[in-house]
Amino acid sequence: SFFYERKPSNSAEQALTKLKSKAEKELCITIAFNTPWTIELLIDSWHHYCNETPLLVADNSNRHEASGDIRKICNAKNITYIKLPKNPVKHPSRSHGLALNWTWRNIVVNLEHLERVGFIDHDCYPIKQCSPNYQSSALAYGIIKSSWIEENNAKNLWAGYMFFQQKSATRLQ
């Protein structure tokens, strides 16, 4: 994770400039992976039901054609797009985790105006009007899952639906 998070992305600076110029207080991020149609459906649903919260697509695809299609969809629908650096991990969950960490360290922490940030799976579609970024004072919000270490009763947030108070969460690093 340490070395991957330091890999550059050709599109990150352009995306950061765009996000900084908008100075939004909320942002929701989805990690795309090889399925342009899911991204198109998510964006269409997002525009219809969650239009008050900007969406960022961070593309973790390992197929060049899929990445090109996802980029075109994002450009056509005015969604900020980042092509993540080539992910060295083949395991889907670990690859997704590295993509989340890269996005947090290279995008989220560089947006000083951001108050709340969320991550949503690329196939998790809103079906009614909502603002996915919560308004509570809690540090984090999402779907709580039991940890694989069951004997210590640990819990974690599901990476497909989790939201944070950005400034508080960044201080924890």
Image: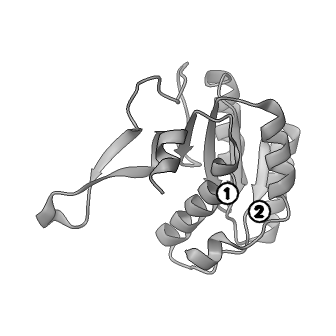
Element assignment for label 2 = helix
Instruction: Name the residue nearer the viewer: 124 or 5.
Output: 5
Q: Which mark is residue 35?
A: 1
- Name the quadrant containing residue 51: top right
Q: Is residue 46 above or below residue 167?
A: above
Residue 135 point in image, percent of width and height: 47, 23
Residue at x 54% of width, y 45% of height: 119
Amino acid type at circle 1 is Thr
Instruction: Name the residue nearer the viewer: 155 or 64.
Output: 155
Instruction: Name the residue nearer the viewer: 141 or 32.
Output: 141
Q: Is residue 83 above or below residue 80?
A: below
Residue 114 point in image, percent of width and height: 64, 35
Residue at x 74% of width, y 71% of height: 63
In the image: residue 30, left or right of residue 47: left
Sequence-earlier tag: 1 or 2: 1
Q: Are marks 1 and 2 in contact (CB under 8 Å)?
A: yes
Amino acid type at circle 2 is Ala
Residue topped by disc 2: 66
